[in-house]
């Protein structure tokens, strides 16, 4: 379906996820369509602005039209997404971004959305970004599956992601990641809107069993089964970057991951964020 309003053209990329938006910079920076963009973000999960090519200041300004700007921990407004330690001193932490995750599972209120723009590609055959719609994944579960997972809670740990990319981390590296903490979250997030989404990803360690000892085998099987369900083709979109592309995703209703790429390839994206507006519930 393709629809248009004054200076704003939209095209759904896939039936269950992703919408492409075309508009000139001035229109986007004016905030004229900010309400519509926010609506589409919640409805579609991922919004793509092909080759919009914002400057640093423009990306920050556009982010501010959509909600409350969320600076990085050190206060900077732009975050360089790169696995090259010469570009990003926290590159080791980003190794977990190659696996399905939600940003901010260690926070009481996760960020609402991320805005990611391509600055340099490196090898164009590497480093795509994949997204899945966790609202749609929940909606399409059978009634039996919904009943099975209703009320379940999951322990999330940042350090759990280490074992995806480093099966034998040093004790020092593990303690450093463990210092980030753990957080118990609902498996099904009931949003203020009434919609429900799945809370999964590489930080999800095990189901919390309040009635007795944890059955780790059943816990692992359920979490992997739900991840496989949520990341099937009907619910996913894979973005192949072109320099200047900007992609926004609803962090509260999607998971995402980067596909592998050479850290020295020159691939560089830059991120801005919107403050979260509701806690996990």
Image (spheres, rainbow, N blue to C red):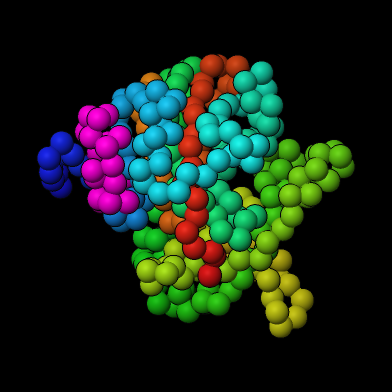
- In the displayed structure image, the side of residue 233 where residue 257 appears, left or right: right
Does residue 260 belong to the magenta stretch? no
115 and 253: which is toward the camera: 115
Q: What is the x, y in percent for residue 119?
A: 45, 21
Please name the residue shown 64% across and 25% down the image.
Answer: 88
Q: Is 264 drawn above or below residue 80 in the view shown?
A: above
Count up the numbered dots: 0
Q: Is 242 drawn above or below residue 107 in the view shown?
A: above
Q: What is the x, y in percent for residue 50?
A: 29, 29
Confirm whether residue 153 shows in the render.
yes
64 and 236: which is toward the camera: 64
- In the displayed structure image, the side of residue 159 where residue 218 appears, left or right: left
Q: What is the x, y in percent for residue 246?
A: 37, 32
- In the displayed structure image, the side of residue 181 where residue 78 appears, left or right: left
Please name the residue shown 73% across and 72% down the image.
Answer: 214
Magenta segment: 14-38
Q: What is the x, y in percent for residue 208?
A: 68, 71
């Amino acid at each position: 379906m393709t629809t248009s309003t004054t200076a704003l053209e939209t095209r759904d990329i896939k039936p269950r996820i992703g919408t492409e938006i075309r508009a000139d910079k001035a229109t986007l920076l004016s905030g004229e369509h900010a309400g519509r963009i926010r609506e589409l973000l919640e409805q579609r999960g991922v919004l793509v602005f092909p080759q919009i090519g914002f400057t640093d200041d423009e990306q920050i300004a556009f982010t501010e039209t959509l909600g409350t700007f969320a600076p990085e921990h050190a206060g900077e407004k732009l975050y360089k997404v790169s696995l090259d330690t010469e570009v990003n001193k926290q590159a080791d932490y980003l190794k977990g971004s190659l696996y399905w995750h939600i940003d901010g599972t260690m926070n009481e209120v996760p960020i609402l959305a991320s805005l990611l723009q391509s600055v340099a590609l490196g090898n164009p055959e590497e480093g795509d970004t994949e997204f899945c719609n966790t609202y749609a994944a929940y909606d399409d579960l059978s009634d039996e599956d919904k009943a099975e997972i209703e009320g379940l809670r999951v322990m999330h740990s940042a350090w759990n992601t280490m074992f995806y990319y480093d099966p034998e981390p040093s004790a020092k590296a593990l303690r450093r990641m463990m210092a980030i903490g753990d957080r118990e979250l609902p498996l099904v997030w009931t949003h203020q809107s009434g919609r429900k989404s799945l809370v999964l990803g590489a930080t999800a360690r095990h189901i919390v069993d309040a009635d007795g000892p944890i059955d780790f085998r059943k816990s692992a099987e359920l979490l992997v089964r739900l991840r496989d369900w949520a990341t099937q083709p009907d619910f996913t979109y894979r973005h192949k970057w072109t320099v200047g592309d900007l992609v926004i995703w609803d962090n509260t209703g999607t998971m995402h991951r980067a596909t592998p790429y050479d850290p020295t390839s020159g691939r560089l994206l830059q991120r801005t964020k919107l403050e979260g507006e509701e806690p996990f519930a």
